[in-house]
Image (cartoon, rainbow, N blue to C red):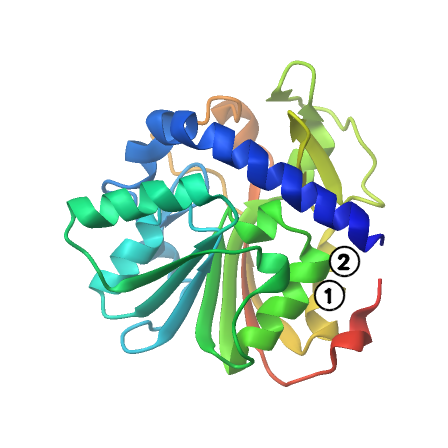
Amino acid sequence: MNPHHDAEIARINRSVWDRWSDGYQSKHGEFLTGQNAEAWGLWRRPESGLRILDRVRGRDVLEAGCGAAAWSRSLARRGARVTAVDISSRQICHALRRCAAEESSHISFLVANAERLPFRDSTFDVVFSDYGALSWADPYLTVPEISRVLRPGGQLAFCTNSPFFALCWDPDARTLRPELRHEYFGLHTREVGQGAVDYVLPYGEWIRLFRAYGMTVEALIEEPPVPGSTTTFTDRPAEWTGRWPLESIWSVRKVSDTGAGSAAR
């Protein structure tokens, strides 16, 4: 993989999210924060029901791709020592504004690219991402970085698009179709718009990547929305998401330290 190409994608994604941020928060912000703060994915499956995350009280937690940091603010209220990063400075501005409104000051915010995390090795007990860095930064770069900053025994938990989403997405109509439209083998990047790119990997490639960096999969959850659920993400039709998995929720455990060169693509 060409690192110069990766740097250019990251630059474009940062620029696009700085432009998108205000509109995104205006459309989705209340839906993602309010009572849905600790919930996964675009249909907001409650963490209280799924129980994905490890215990967080008194532990060092990193949110990778925090947006307005609804998760981070909620976990901080539960006693976690939270650090939240996002590639977009405008998204961080929204997070800081919400923290100020709640008079919350127990989160450290940083504008940073998850492909090059500015932290020492073995800094965090938990790293998590809900359609954040594991969707908008290259997994071939973020997974080794997350493994590096996790302590042995630490957890990576994240939600991202399932391969089915990428296979059935119609970019012209900007909706999901009930037929395969793209090839499964070789999944990596997906054009989103205005030059921005997100990332989707095949299941086997995720597993290979985790194993190469000393991590093992503990859970992979793919479920339809709870009956009666609503979402502000209207390009994910309920009829489609009730039949095929829209998103994958992973829980991965770091079991050992391993050299960064062991997972060359």
Q: Which of 251 and 32 is in front in this view?
A: 32
Residues under numbered marks 1 and 2 in contact, where contact means CB atoms less than 8 Å apart: yes
64 lies above or below 29 = below
Which quarter of the image is occupied by the C terminus?
bottom right
Percent from the top left, x then y, of residue 81?
31, 71
Which quarter of the image is occupied by the N terminus?
bottom right
| Residue at (34, 39) in percent of width and height | 32
Q: Nearer the viewer, residue 86 or 219?
A: 86
| Residue at (70, 83) in percent of width and height | 258
The residue pinned by badge 2 equals 205
In the picture, measured across the screen, residue 240 lies left or right of residue 260, that is: left
33 lies above or below 141 = above
Looking at the rendered structure, the secondary structure element under dot 1 is helix
The residue pinned by badge 1 equals 209
Residue 16 found in image quarter = top right
Q: Which of 200 and 240 is in front in this view?
A: 200
| Residue at (62, 19) in percent of width and height | 174
